[in-house]
Amino acid sequence: MHPEASVPRASLPRDSTSETLPWITSLDGSSPGSSILDAGSGLLPFAISKTQPAARKRRCLWVMVVAAALAAAAATAVVVTRHGGTLMGSGATTITNSTQPTQVNASIPQGAFFTWGGNNERNKLYLNAGLDPVTVASVSFGRRATVKLPFSDPITAKGTDSVYAQPIVFPFNGTEYALIVTTGNNVYVIDGPNGTVVSAKNFGPPHRILEDPVFIAAQQSKDPDSGMGVCRDIVDFVGTVGTPVVDITTQTAYFFSITVAPPPNQYQRTMWFHAVDAITLVEKDGFPVTIAPTADNNPAMKFDPNYTYQRPGLLLSNGIVYGAFGGHCDLNQGFAGWLIGVDAKSGQILTAWSTVGISAVANGGGAIWQSGAGLALDDDGNIHLVTGTGMNPGNADFYTDTPATKSNIPPNLHESYVKFALNSTTRQARVVDFMTPTQVQYYDYQDFDYGAGAPVILPASLRGPNGERLSCTMDKPGRILVHRVNDLGGFAGGANASYLSGKYGRDNVLSVFDLGAYINATKVDPEPSRNGAGLFEGYFGTPAIWTAEAGVAYFYFAVKYGPMVVLEWNPITYSFDKVVGESTFSFSLRTADMNSMSGLPVITSLGMTPGSAVVWVTDVFNGLYALGSVPDSSAKIKTLYHDGAFVGGQISRFNIPGFSHTGSGLVYVPTNNGTLLIYGKLN
C-alpha cells in the first residue's frame, strides 16, 4: 500500500492549480468497465497521466485505493435499482422513477464521512461543490426543482414538519443523494440531479411542544409577556433535529430521534439512536437503541429524554458516533448538557458525560446546542464543544473564584469551551481541557449563552505564535475568542484582561474581537424594547472562513437583524482588527409567531483558486442568498443571487444548505412547508 493510502483525503497536500482530477465514475452501475471496480476484470478503469505532478499521482493512487474499498462495501450493500425497479425497505414508503441517474464524480471527503459543514473542523468550506461566482450570478443559475416531500402521518399532518438539520449530500454508485431529516421524524433520500424522492420513512411519533401542558406552563412561568404562547425556537415538533452523519464505506446514516408513547402517556418520551441504510433507510441489525444512560462523571445524573433534546450536528470518529444534548429554550429545570458516544457497529454507549458533575446539583443546565453546529475534531482526534447557560446562578456550589487550569478542571462546566480526548483502552471520551469566562455567573444571569456559538478549528495556514493550531468561539453578545487548541485557557488564568475594560475578568485566550461593540456603535437597534442597549443576543453559530485571496484570510459572520459582516485575520496579532466588509442587506426581524435569524454562512469554491469563492446564507423570512467573498472599494460584498420568492417563515433558523462534494453544482435548501428546493444550472 502506498504510504498516503491510509491518510484521509482532506489531509493530503493540495497544489495550487485548478486542474480537475479524473475521478472514477460508473455509467449505470452494471456496464463492464464503467464502474469504480470492473466486476469482470477486477481492474480499475483509471489512468494516471505521465504529465501529472508527483503529488497528483500520489492522490490518484489514493483514489484508486478508496475506490476499491468502496467497491468492496458496495458488493455487500443493498443494491438500489433505479431503472423502473423498486426499493425494498422494511416499512419504508418508497418512490421510484425510471429516469436515468445523472452521473457525478466520486470524490470522497475526509474519512469518507459526510457531516455537518462538510468537514470535522467545521469551517463550512466546500472545495468541490462545482460552483463559482460567474455561474451563480448568471441567468443560467436558479431554482431547478421543487421536490415535494410526500410522506406524512396522522401526527405530523396536524402541524409544521420542520427541517433544522443540514441536508447531507453524498455520492453512491455514480448518483448524488441528499439525506433530509425532519422534526416530525420523517427521513428522506433524494436523487439530487433528477430531483426525485428515492426513499421515505417515518421513525415514530414526535413530541409536539405546542400541546404539552408541562412546556406551556414552564414558558408562561419564565416569560408570561412573550406573546409567543410557548417558546418557538423549534416549531411544533421535536423528533429528529440534529444533523446526521453518513459513512459511505458502510452505506450507513446515523441520527438520534425522540418519540412519544401512545395516549394517555403521549408526553412520555424516548430517545433513540438509529443506524440505517443510507439509501433504503432500513435499520441495521441491532438498531435502533435507546439512550438513557447514567453520567460517567456523576452517578446522580440520569439522562432524561423528557427534558433533553439532541441539536448539534453529529460527529463520527474512531468508529464512534457522538451526539450532544441540551434542553429546549431553558424551559423545565430538569435538563443538563450531555455528550454521548455510541459504538457505530454495536450500539453500545461508550461515553455519557454531563455538564453537571456535582451530585447535589441535579438541574444545572449547561445545554450543548451550538445553534445546530457540529461537534469539532482537531488533528489529534480530540472533540471540541461549547456549553450554554447554567440554571443555578444563585447556587454557590456552581461557581468558583479560584483560578483553574486543565490540571484541575471544575466538575460543572456550563458556559464553557470543553475539549475531550479518547481513552484508547476503554474508548471513553474524557475532559482534558476547558475555558470558562471569568464572569461566568454574569453570563448566566444575562443569558449571554456561550453555547450559542460553537468551536471552529482554524485552517492549518492560520497558526499561533509557536506554530500551534488555533480555534475560535463566539458568545451571544458577539465577542469572538481565539484559542490555542493545545491550551484552551482554563478559568481566570490570563495575565491581561481579555474583555472590554477588564469587565469580564482575565481570560487566558490568544485574542478577542468584540463584534457586538462594533455593531452597537454603527447600527440602529431595530428592537430596542427587547434588546436594551444594543443588538443583544445577536450572534449565533460559527463563521465561514476563506483563506485563498492573496494571503488574506476572511471570516464571515451573520448578525441577527443586522448584515453579514466580513473580518480580516491579522497574522501578526493573531486576531481581527476591524470589520472590512458588509452585505448590502440586513437579516429579517422576528414575528409574533416565529423567531427570525439567518442561517450560518457557508463557502463554496473551485478548490483554493483565488476569486472562486461564493458565500451562501439563508434567512428565515427572505430565502437564499449567494454573495461574493471579497469586499469591494466601498466595503460591500456583492449579492450574486437571491431567491426570496416563496412564503416567509419557511426556512428554519440557523439552518445551512447542503452542497455537493463531487462537483455537481447543486444547492439543497429544505423548507418547512414539505418541500426541498434544489438550485443549480438551469440548462
Image: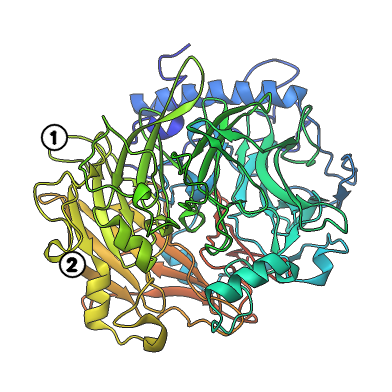
Decide if residue 6 is on the left or right side of residue 24: left
Decide if residue 525 is on the left or right side of residue 652: left
Q: Identify the image's colour scheme: rainbow, by chain, secondary structure or one colour.
A: rainbow
Q: Is residue 265 or residue 458 the one in the foreground?
A: 265
Spatial distance from mark 1 to mark 2, Cα to Cα? Answer: 24 Å
From where the camera sits, is residue 369 visible? yes
The amino acid at mark 2 is Lys
| Residue positioned 71% across, 15% down in the render | 41
Q: Earlier in the sequence, mark 1 or mark 2?
A: 1
From where the camera sits, is residue 526 visible? no
Above or below, 92 relative to 570: above
Q: Is residue 516 or residue 251 the one in the foreground?
A: 516
Horizontal and vertical percent position of residue 320: 56, 29
Which element is circle 1 on? loop
Above or below, 475 relative to 523: above
Above or below, 174 relative to 568: above
Which element is circle 2 on? strand
Q: Is residue 589 or residue 349 the one in the foreground?
A: 349
User: Label 2: few (<14), some or many (≥20) within 10 Å?
Assistant: some
Q: Which mark is residue 466?
A: 1
Give the quadrant of the C terminus: bottom right
Q: How many marks?
A: 2
Decide if residue 504 is on the left or right side of residue 47: left
Q: Which mark is residue 195?
A: none
* Residue 355 occupies quadrant: top left
Do the CB atoms of the residues marked 1 and 2 lie less than 8 Å apart? no
- The residue indicated by pointer 2 is 578
* Residue 344 occupies quadrant: top right
Horizontal and vertical percent position of residue 182: 70, 58
User: Label 1: few (<14), some or many (≥20) within 10 Å?
Assistant: few
The amino acid at mark 1 is Asn
